[in-house]
Each structure stands twice: as structure tokens, then as C-alpha cells.
Image (cartoon, rainbow, N blue to C red):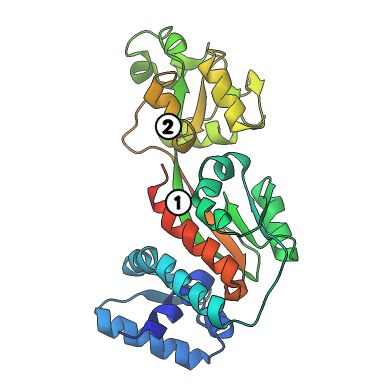
Amino acid sequence: MQLGWLQTFTAVYRTGSFTKAARELGITQPAVTQHIRGLENELGKPLFVRTPQGATPTSEGESLAHGVQGSISDLNAAVARHFGTASSNRPLRLGGPAELVSARVLPSISRLIADGMDVSVTLGEADHLLADLKSGHLDIVVSTIRPRYRGLDAAPLADEEFVLLASPQTAGTLAEGALALDGPRALEKLPLIAYAEALPIFRRYWRTVFDAPPPTRPAVVIPDLRGVLAAVIASAGISVLPTYLCTDALAAGTVVPLLEPEVPPLNTFYLATRSGALADHRLAAVHGHLLAQAKDWT
């Protein structure tokens, strides 16, 4: 199996297009097609389905991408570091949601920072961060939504799982089995602590787990999930939070899940860069590190 085939495969997977991959790699589209066919013949499995919209990975393609993307990024970074001609003294500019960047992203690239990489972090909502990425004000974005801008590449990074939480004291006010019996009606008298007035996380949870419309309004709005968690721990009310943020609180017993559905609601994080930007060895190193480390995020 040729390494070039895998590099071409990851480019097609990132860009969702044989044409875009050819442009990024500096080769012809027929060459991209030849590489993918060679890899498919070697593995005995189809990796992409060609559609008018581009190239959609098969389940085998998804599995291969998750297995090799980080390694290919590391190899490209190593080559660029030793033989690349581009250089820059400015910090690498990273954007993402405040809670995930604090809890998972920065710890995941801490070794790179300790080794001398300068990083400038911008925190905010996905739409604004992706616009800054497209305009060149950011280099890489961890996005809570799949980027739709032309000229941006995105790789699935990790799934966040949501859990309905309360403090043990608040949970004790519910009659045993009430939630399983009455569903969301059992929660009507409990204050809701939300990230935003529109209840986006509650909305996803209610529709997925209860197959019901979400509550109409929150009792408290805190535009930082860490503040929401603190309010729940203090027995101010209940909330729906990503498990990565409350792992320690769950282990300590300061919050408890009110329900453990068989299929919990999920949301996918995406790692977004401008097309062709991974030629920068620093950016490729961060990209590869995050893809590798995100496998262990919870």
C-alpha cells in the first residue's frame, strides 16, 4: 500500500471532493481517482460514493479516516517542519467554545505549547468563529456545527453526549420512578438552568429522549456552561450538560443523572481549517494532535 494513496484519501475525506483534493495536493483529478481506486482495490472495500455534491465516505471510509487522519497529519507536519519553506513568527490562532477549549482542547495541545508553540485563543459561538476562519483571522476552529463555507475543510473531531442533571438534593424532591412514568411532566416544577434563552441543549434532549417539545422558558440563563454546572451543584435547578464538562462532578456525586436513556443525545464537534492550510507544519501538528487526543475525550 502506498503512503501517497492514504494522503490522497485523507484529502478527499477532508474536502468531500476529488476536485478539491486534487487542488490541495497539486495533482490532477484523474490522479486522485487513480489513488483512491488503488486503495480500494488494495483493501477490497469501497471508500467513497460519488455524488453530484461531491464524495461521500462509506462506513469503511469513515472507519479508515478515523484510524489514519492523525498519523497522516503527523507525517505531513514532520516533512513540512524539516523541508518546508513557509515560516511565520505569529501565534497560531485557534477558536472554539469556551468550555470545550478550557476542558479538553488546551490540555490536548499542552505538550506542543510547552515545546515552544505560540497559540492565541479566541472563544465564541461557531458561526462567528467560522466566519473569522474563512476571512483569515483564525487558523483553526473547533466548531459545534458542520462548516458550510466554501473553502473550509472539516474533519469530525469528537461527539459530545448530553445528560440531564441535578444535585442529589434536587433529585431527592422527585418521587421514585416519576420521570420514567410521567416523562417531562415530572420536571415541570423544577427550575431550568440554561445556556441560552432559546434552550438549544434542552431542545435537543427533549426531542431526542422524550419525543416532546422543550420547556417554554428557563428560570436562569447563564451563557457559560461552567456557570450552569455550578448552579446545578448548588441546587438552583436542573440542566442538560455535556458529559465531558461534568465528569468530575459526577464522579464526586455533587450531581447525579436524572435519566440514563439507552441512546443519549449527541452532538459532533468538527475541526475546521481553510483548504490547503495544513501545509503549515504548526497547524498540521495541532490538527493531528487534536484528532489523536479527541479519541479519549468523554
| Rendered-image quadrant of the C terminus | top left
Q: Is residue 42 left or right of residue 268?
A: left
Which residue lies at the image location 41% right of the left edge and 9% below the top edge?
174
Question: Where 210 falls versus 253 (above or below)?
Answer: below
| Rendered-image quadrant of the N terminus | bottom left
Tell me the mark number nearer the camera, choosing from 1 and 2: 2
Question: Where 253 falls versus 240 (above or below)?
Answer: above
Q: Residue 175: image x %, image y %?
A: 37, 7
Three-letter code for the amino acid on which mark 1 is drawn: Ala
Whole-angstrom CA distance, mark 1 to mark 2, is: 16 Å
Question: Where 110 falls versus 64 (above or below)?
Answer: above
Q: In this view, does 204 lie to the left or right of 91?
A: left
The picture quadrant where one finds residue 34 is bottom left
Q: Residue 199: image x %, image y %?
A: 60, 31
Can I make out residue 21 in this image?
A: yes
Q: Residue 158 carries which label?
A: 1
Q: Residues within 10 Å of mark 1 (few under 14, many from 20)?
A: many
Residue under numbered circle 2: 247
Please tell me which residue lies in front, 170 or 141: 141
Which residue lies at the image location 65% right of the left edge and 58% below the top edge?
118
Question: Where 52 falls versus 188 (above or below)?
Answer: below
| Kind of element beneath mark 1 | strand
User: Which one is earlier in the sequence, the residue at label 1 or at label 2?
Assistant: 1
Can I make out residue 192 in this image?
A: no
| Kind of element beneath mark 2 | helix
Which residue lies at the image location 61% right of the left edge and 56% below the top edge?
141
Q: Residue 284: image x %, image y %?
A: 54, 68
Residue farthest left in this picture = 44
